[in-house]
């Protein structure tokens, strides 16, 4: 398992796209959960065609797609899919993955990220508060309703025709900035706990987990 310490998920998605440009079955990129269109410039930079989808329309270009249903009619099958920070919002994640699988071209690639439920910070939060870090009751307002344990995500992907090419984590945990207060010493203790967990469980280092997959 690889950890990407010095890049964010946007950079990771671009890195994976750049690695397979000559292997894409076509030039269409479906951006599922396109938000305000942050990936448009990246996709078009590589001479590809951006096809954005979202559950709620935030920009005029996006097409509304509820992943509980098949893709709307008239949409092109993509050769690459951007699917970042969406899966944890799905009440029926397997159905969502199945509908995406039916949407993509054979041989298409997909980048998928979610919060990492196995991160050290999440495990410490579970120990102290009995809730995973990004899946506390307060996160229900963001509709974080699916805890994406990596083996479960992989099961759903493989069960719906995807091959996992890479499972990795993104992010690092930095030494706390010095200050003269009690909070600093609490931060030091927290840092020590996190580093200890990472030492024994390397998958704990990243706050984001990432899957790079291909449709068989």
Image (cartoon, grey):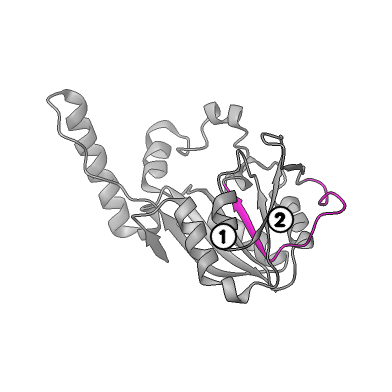
User: Dot 1 surroundings within 10 Å: few (below 14), some, or many (20 or more)?
Assistant: few
Q: Are marks 1 and 2 in contact (CB under 8 Å)?
A: no
Residue 73 magenta-drawn? yes
Q: Residue at x 65, y 59 (%)?
A: 81
Quadrant assignment for the C terminus? bottom right
The N terminus - image quarter:
bottom left
* Stretch of the chain drawn in magenta: 68-84
From the image, tell me which residue sits under label 2. Answer: 97
The residue that disc 1 covers is 151
Dot placed on the residue nearer the N-terminal end, 1 or 2: 2
Q: Nearer the viewer, residue 3 or 17?
A: 17
Label 1 residue SS:
helix
**In the depicted view, which residue is nearer to us: 44 or 1?**
44
Give the image location of residue 210, x and y in percent: 51, 57
Residue 25 coordinates in the image, percent (x, y): 69, 73
Find the distance from the CA under tag 1 to the CA under tag 2: 15 Å
Principal SS element in the magenta part? loop
What residue do we see at 54% from left, 31% from top?
139
């Amino acid at each position: 398992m690889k950890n990407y310490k010095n890049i964010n998920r946007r950079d990771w998605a671009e890195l994976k796209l750049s690695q397979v440009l000559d292997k894409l079955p076509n030039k269409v990129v479906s951006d599922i959960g396109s938000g305000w269109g942050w990936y448009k410039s990246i996709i078009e930079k590589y001479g590809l065609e951006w096809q954005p989808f979202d559950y709620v329309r935030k920009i005029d270009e996006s097409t509304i797609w509820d992943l509980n249903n098949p893709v709307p009619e008239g949409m092109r099958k993509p050769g690459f899919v951007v699917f970042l920070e969406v899966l944890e919002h799905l009440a029926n994640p397997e159905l969502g993955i199945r509908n995406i699988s039916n949407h993509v071209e054979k041989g298409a690639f997909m980048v998928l990220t979610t919060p990492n439920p196995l991160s050290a910070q999440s495990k410490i939060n579970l120990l102290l508060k009995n809730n995973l870090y990004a899946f506390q009751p307060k996160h229900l307002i963001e509709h974080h309703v699916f805890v994406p344990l990596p083996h479960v995500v992989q099961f759903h992907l493989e069960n719906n025709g995807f091959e996992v090419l890479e499972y990795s984590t993104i992010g690092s945990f930095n030494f706390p900035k010095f200050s003269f207060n009690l909070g600093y010493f609490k931060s030091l203790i927290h840092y020590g706990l996190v580093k200890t967990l990472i030492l024994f469980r390397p998958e704990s280092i990243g706050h984001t987990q990432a899957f790079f997959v291909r449709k068989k």
